[in-house]
Image (cartoon, helix red, strand yellow):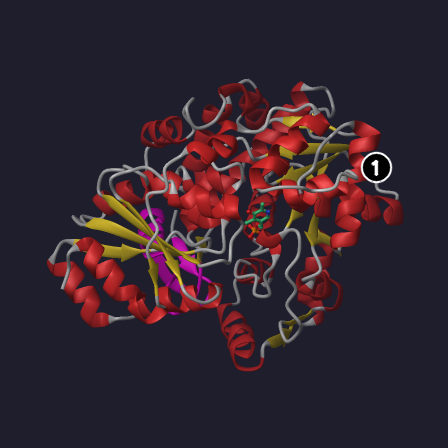
């Protein structure tokens, strides 16, 4: 199976080449030229497998220059017992007559990004080997919180790789910072960067485009790469858990084979919900995909009106991983729904760069509306939903999940749609105890760890050890750098002039 660029469908490469490249040279994103398909019988057979078996089945249909044995080995390693509880890799929990929660936060960093970032190191190092690239790959990440830790945890001590993360000094929560600065591993490095997230991001971009530095790195046997969410190697692993969720619904007797489900996803960069769309295109019986946004509701407006407009105020919300105005992965959806019209995509994306907005034609807008419902919930609604769901069902949502639950409830009330529904839960509520606790009517007091334990006591739950143990861990990385000195910091760490 070939992979093509959203901005040039004649540019064809293999899946392993797409993983090595990340972004296409023309600025486009890679996706498979044809979509594999799964029959109901195959889905039924998957229900008898464990998570690793299901993921191997799905991924081998997409990553065709890897054997199923190779993929099974990587997946078994990535989702091994010390990383994910074996029976609870991606459990589905019933909320009410229609609604079910797909918990995606049982990985080492307590957010769904672990599914992709635990596996990516294996896919990336194997892809380099397959393509005869004999270099140590150096992953550079600028992070506002969750991605940096998930990438560190994935790449720590993976042979043939090194990873360096920059986070904005003072721009993350204390827990998020400690998650990064206490990271173990011989091949990891973490810096605080002065300024905000954009400064850190721009600093990393400058390093990536510095040709002289690339040459110096090359001479020392290093190759720069990113663990950004536009890499196909990050998207593909996410398709698997929607198949797994369908299997769990079958096993629980919540649906019969062939019944359709809705999928609701709290959305930022449009990666996770795009994976759900791929699952549908592969034959998973899916009715509507519901795109849930927080107050940064650029996608709600787009799906409703057909105009994408990033010229608007940016809000910091209680669901920070969805605070985003440019949803990069949307480009892949537009390419697929327009019938691979690469020229049109180039035009739209150029408009986004030059004026910050674009409008799709009526036909494309109708196609989007036929597949996607949408809605948004501000912090007030988010907190209300956390409190109400807990009171009604005993289920404890994090802020991101609560956005999705609220948008689903409003969708269900407005449409009367009774289709069984899976709502993606993207983070552990303990990661955002400072918001969840007041939503349950408690007064937050003390530091992040006090809040975590107060939430545990209030809800009679055990907080994830990965978070509570941070309190006693040694901070390994305390250096702070000016954005202009980020390259020097990387060079010093790698001992490259
Ligand atoms: C990254 C993230 C999201 C947004 O996912 P996208 O794939 O960017 O749409 C939602 N919730 C949490 C907790 C996240 O970390």
* Residue 74 drawn in magenta: no
478 relative position to 292: left or right: left
When asked about the image quadrant of residue 363, the answer is bottom right
Above or below: residue 73 compared with residue 233: above
Q: Which residue does the image show at 25% across and 45% down from the upper left?
A: 161
Q: Which residue does the image show at 51% across and 41% down from the upper left?
A: 238
Nearer to me, 386 or 348: 386
Residue highlighted by disc 1: 418
| Residue 97 in view in this figure | no
- Determine the residue located farthest toward the bottom in the rendered image: 354
Other residues around mark 1 within 10 Å, as few (<14) / some (14–19) / many (≥20): few
Magenta part of the protein: which range?
3-29
* Residue 26 drawn in magenta: yes
Nearer to me, 191 or 306: 191
Across and down, in percent, residue 150 comes to 44, 43
Above or below: residue 408 compared with residue 213: above
3 relative position to 377: left or right: left
Across and down, in percent, residue 449 comes to 56, 37
438 relative position to 251: left or right: right
Above or below: residue 79 compared with residue 475: above
Numbered marks: total: 1
| Residue 82 in view in this figure | yes
When asked about the image quadrant of residue 386, the answer is top right
């Amino acid at each position: 199976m070939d992979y093509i660029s959203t901005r040039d469908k004649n540019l064809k490469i293999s899946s392993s080449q797409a993983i090595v490249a990340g972004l296409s040279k023309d600025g486009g994103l890679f996706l498979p030229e044809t979509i594999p398909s799964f029959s109901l019988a195959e889905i039924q057979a998957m229900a008898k497998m464990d998570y690793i078996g299901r993921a191997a089945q799905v991924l081998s249909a997409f990553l065709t220059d890897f054997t199923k044995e190779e993929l099974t080995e990587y997946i078994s390693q990535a989702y091994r017992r010390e990383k994910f509880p074996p029976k609870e890799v991606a459990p589905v929990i019933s909320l009410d007559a229609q609604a079910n929660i797909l918990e995606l936060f049982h990985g080492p960093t307590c957010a769904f990004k672990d599914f992709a970032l635990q596996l990516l190191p294996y896919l990336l190092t194997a892809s380099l080997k397959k393509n005869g690239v004999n270099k140590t790959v150096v992953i550079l990440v600028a992070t506002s919180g969750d991605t940096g830790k998930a990438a560190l945890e994935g790449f720590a001590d993976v042979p043939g790789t090194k990873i360096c993360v920059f986070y904005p000094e003072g721009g993350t929560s204390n827990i998020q910072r400690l998650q990064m600065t206490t990271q173990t591993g011989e091949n990891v490095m973490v810096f605080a960067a002065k300024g905000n997230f954009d400064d850190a991001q721009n600093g990393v971009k400058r390093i990536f485009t510095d040709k002289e530095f690339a040459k110096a790195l090359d001479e020392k046997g290093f190759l720069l790469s990113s663990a950004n969410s536009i890499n196909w190697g990050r998207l593909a692993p996410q398709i698997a858990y929607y198949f797994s969720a369908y299997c769990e619904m079958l096993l629980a007797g919540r649906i019969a084979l062939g019944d359709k489900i809705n999928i609701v996803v709290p959305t930022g960069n449009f990666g996770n919900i795009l994976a759900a769309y791929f699952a549908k295109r592969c034959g998973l019986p899916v009715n509507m995909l519901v795109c849930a946004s927080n107050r940064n509701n650029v996608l709600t407006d787009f799906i409703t009106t057909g105009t994408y407009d990033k010229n608007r105020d940016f809000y910091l919300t209680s669901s920070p991983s969805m605070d985003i105005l440019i949803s990069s992965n949307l480009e892949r959806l537009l390419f697929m729904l327009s019938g691979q019209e690469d020229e049109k995509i180039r035009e739209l994306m150029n408009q986004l760069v030059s004026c910050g907005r674009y409008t799709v034609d009526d036909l494309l807008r109708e196609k989007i509306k036929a597949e996607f419902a949408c809605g948004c919930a501000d912090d007030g609604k988010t907190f209300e939903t956390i409190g109400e769901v807990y009171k009604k069902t005993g289920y404890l949502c994090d802020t991101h999940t609560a956005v999705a639950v609220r948008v689903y409830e409003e969708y269900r009330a407005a449409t009367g749609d009774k289709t069984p529904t899976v709502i993606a839960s993207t983070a552990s509520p303990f990661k955002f105890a400072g918001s969840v606790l007041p939503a349950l009517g408690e007064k937050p007091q003390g530091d992040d760890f006090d809040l975590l334990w107060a939430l545990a006591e209030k809800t009679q739950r055990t907080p994830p050890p990965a978070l509570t143990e941070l309190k006693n861990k040694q901070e390994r990385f305390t250096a702070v750098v000016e954005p202009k000195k980020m390259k020097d910091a990387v060079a010093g760490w790698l001992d490259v002039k």
